[in-house]
Image (cartoon, rainbow, N blue to C red):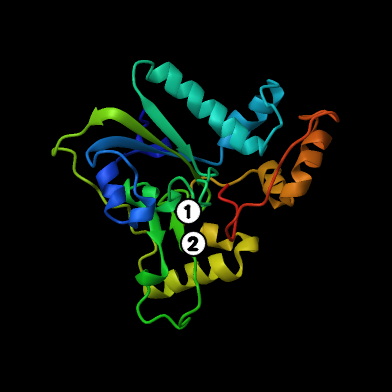
Amino acid sequence: MLQNESNRRVYIAVVGWYNAVVSDAHHLSYPEDTLALVLLSTPSMFERSFLPFLQSQSCEAVRDPIDECITHTVSSAVSLCFPNQSVHASYDYEMLPSRRPKFLAQTAAHVSGAAYYYQKSDVHSPAWGDKKMFGVCIHPRLGGWFAIRALLVFKDVQVGEDLQQKGPPDCVCSQEDRIELLERFNLRWQDWSYRDMVPTEESYSAQQREYFLTPPGQRGALLRQWGYLTDTDKTNIFPKMYPADSF
């Protein structure tokens, strides 16, 4: 299930690594040495998984089709690869009754070593003062052209002390570049320029860009135009509750 570094989408984490850097309200309720996996999607997911998923008519059109595709793909893979394991999956779009996310996706990516989570605290004496500046993960080979999709917790698997945490690659090293990254993400996120802060091996296709640049409420109509949904299908595609969709 784990790929080589050139196309890696799965990263090992431990519950204790995550709990050590989040508030008590966001703690995962498992023993600290419990194994977890952080799952990413790369740009090729759109053509290799999402469009075939729609063509297979597996989409029930009851929520965001991307979310439905990810849930279907992950749950199928878990059932196939870990039939005898008790695995709890949390997805990036899921919320608790308190309206908190089930897990902090960017924090999970950082502690697993998948992508560096750049935040206001990574800038010395920022000029923004008390202004709220959201953080953003940057991948060393994909820049911002990826998404953190899910966290799998293996309830009955405890890791030993031999498993050492590795920090994510710091690919936006200078203070000037970090300032530029956070300003692009917070002030100009619609132009997607923050995604190209580092050289990238892969980015979105023209069709994928058209889909994600379409307002969420109009994506169902676009899929119908492309022939992936029928006129009788109803999709519930809602805007994400943060500066930019984590697509």
Q: CA distance from mark 2 to mark 1?
A: 6 Å
Q: Quadrant of residue 127?
A: bottom left
For the residues labelled 2 and 1, say whether their Cβ atoms are less than 8 Å apart: yes
At x 31% / y 49%, what residue is drawn? 18
At x 44% / y 49%, what residue is drawn? 105
Q: Is residue 214 left or right of residue 185?
A: right
Residue 48 visible in the picture: no
Q: Amino acid at mark 2?
A: Met
Which x, y percent locates residue 108? 38, 48
Q: List the residue tagged with mark 2.
A: 197
Say which element carries label 1. loop
Camera-side residue: 18 or 206? 18
Q: Is residue 215 left or right of residue 139?
A: right
Q: Which mark is residue 143?
A: 1
Q: Is residue 60 left or right of residue 139?
A: right
At x 60% / y 52%, what residue is drawn? 245
Which x, y percent locates residue 160? 15, 35
Determine whether 171 is above or below 236 in the image: below
Q: Residues within 10 Å of mark 2 (few under 14, many from 20)?
A: many
Say which element carries label 2. loop
Camera-side residue: 205 or 216? 216
Q: Quadrant of residue 225?
A: top right
Which x, y percent locates residue 159? 20, 34
Which x, y percent locates residue 236? 72, 40
Q: Amino acid at mark 1?
A: Gly
N-terminal of the pair, mark 2 or mark 1, is 1
